[in-house]
Image (spheres, coloured by chain):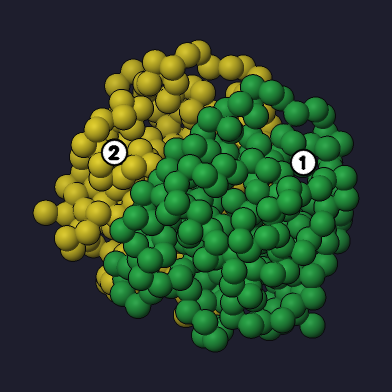
Chain colours: A green, B yellow
Amino acid sequence: MRRLYHQPLSPFCRKIRLVLAEKKIEVELVEEKPWERRLDFLRLNPSGKVPVLRIDGLVLAESGAIFEYLEEVYQTAQLLPDTPAERAEARRLAAWFDDKFHHEVTVNLLYERVNKRLARSGYPESARIKEGARNIKYHLDYIGWLMEGRRWLAGDQLSIADFAAAAQLSCLDYIGDVDWSRSPALKEWYAKVKSRPAFRSLLADLIPGFTPPQHYADLDF
Amino acid sequence: MRRLYHQPLSPFCRKIRLVLAEKKIEVELVEEKPWERRLDFLRLNPSGKVPVLRIDGLVLAESGAIFEYLEEVYQTAQLLPDTPAERAEARRLAAWFDDKFHHEVTVNLLYERVNKRLARSGYPESARIKEGARNIKYHLDYIGWLMEGRRWLAGDQLSIADFAAAAQLSCLDYIGDVDWSRSPALKEWYAKVKSRPAFRSLLADLIPGFTPPQHYADLDF
């Protein structure tokens, strides 16, 4: 049985769920609370991080490595473009959101507001929340700027870059931290990603104790 | 002209230098100080990070994306194994060092001791240095544990996993922060990576104001 160990508001798990759904690979979702450091889970992935995917008799960890595996083996949908140069651009932008956006924004907003409460590891620090709120602006503007000249984030076709970005943003949107009015190009891009069938299961997640804003699951937000 | 914008003690730049040298791709090295946020450099890479590689008429950024590009286009040496499962393991371990090791160790030790002084952005925080010194132990033990059953970190052949790990460790070794005596398997592995011709240019780097320990450039350390 294919199985994904995940957290509903982990952007890296959401990225892999989008990839799996886009490629029409069915998996059983198993919620894992990484902060509990469950021994059986640490045996699967000594880094202690989600997502972890059981597939084809393997145990895969690290969302970048999981993605590349799925892209190599399951060609039901292609999430990297055809040429090495275009693939480099898609991977550059995926890394931008997985790494830069994540550390400058997601860690400061989502982890302060949500993860700390879930893991009972302290109270949100307002200095961090302010920093995250300041940082997200230029990332949103970067998306808007890219989308003024492109159909999708990395070029002419939907790619892992769109899913990496939308995975981070959908988590922040759940807690109402994304100002979609910053640019029409930004909002159009997100509406386009959000309306894909692959996005549905993400929008249906509900995290006890946290209620998403009205527009969260609305395709015409 | 191929050109790599880099910092001598950036582990991500070192990883790409190892990949380039192993594949026998000659490049001109240009030192970039990312903390100066030079406008012409930000035009090349809006994220402001090194390494950035000019090659084949392209400008490539993000070390993971640069590596995958080089691996696809330059087959003079192969740094990912043959099967998707083995490649997933090599990429998992590369991500372990690029992400987990980097944030738990390198940021706390190297960035506190060296980067803050280079960028004149404050004094080292001893709490962070202590945390880094505590964290590095279990990473070193993980390498030792892996190497008890393997020829190279990700399996039977040298891969990007070895270079990702050695790139981080060589920076920390420059400031004397690696206790190689923790296990014979760890030390043997590093001696094997370090003795590759690709490693030579790294060991020759000297950073003004910081003198590496005696054993740093010694192949029989």
Give the total of numbered labels.
Answer: 2
- The residue nearer to you, when weighing B46 against A196, is A196
Say whether residue A28 is visible.
yes
Q: Is residue A208 above or below residue A160?
A: above
Q: Is residue B156 above or below residue B4?
A: below
Identity of the amino acid at label 1? Val
Could you classify mark 1 by the number of other residues whose Cα lies within 10 Å: few (under 14), some (14-19), or many (20 or more)? Answer: some
* Quadrant of the rendering where the N terminus of chain A is positioned: bottom right
Q: Which residue is mark 2?
A: B42
- The residue nearer to you, when weighing B168 against A93, is A93
Q: Residue at x 62, y 56 (%)?
A: A221
In the rendered image, residue A168, in percent from the top left (x then y), is placed at 60, 52
Q: Residue at x 59, y 51 (%)?
A: A169
Q: Mark 2 and mark 1, same subunit?
A: no
Q: Nearer the viewer, mark 2 or mark 1?
A: 1
Identity of the amino acid at label 2? Leu
- The residue nearer to you, when weighing A146 against A87, is A146
- The residue nearer to you, when weighing B108 against A26, is A26
Q: CA distance from mark 2 to mark 1?
A: 33 Å
Which residue is farthest front?
A220
Q: Is residue A129 above or below residue B86?
A: above
**Numbered mark located on residue A114 in the image:** 1
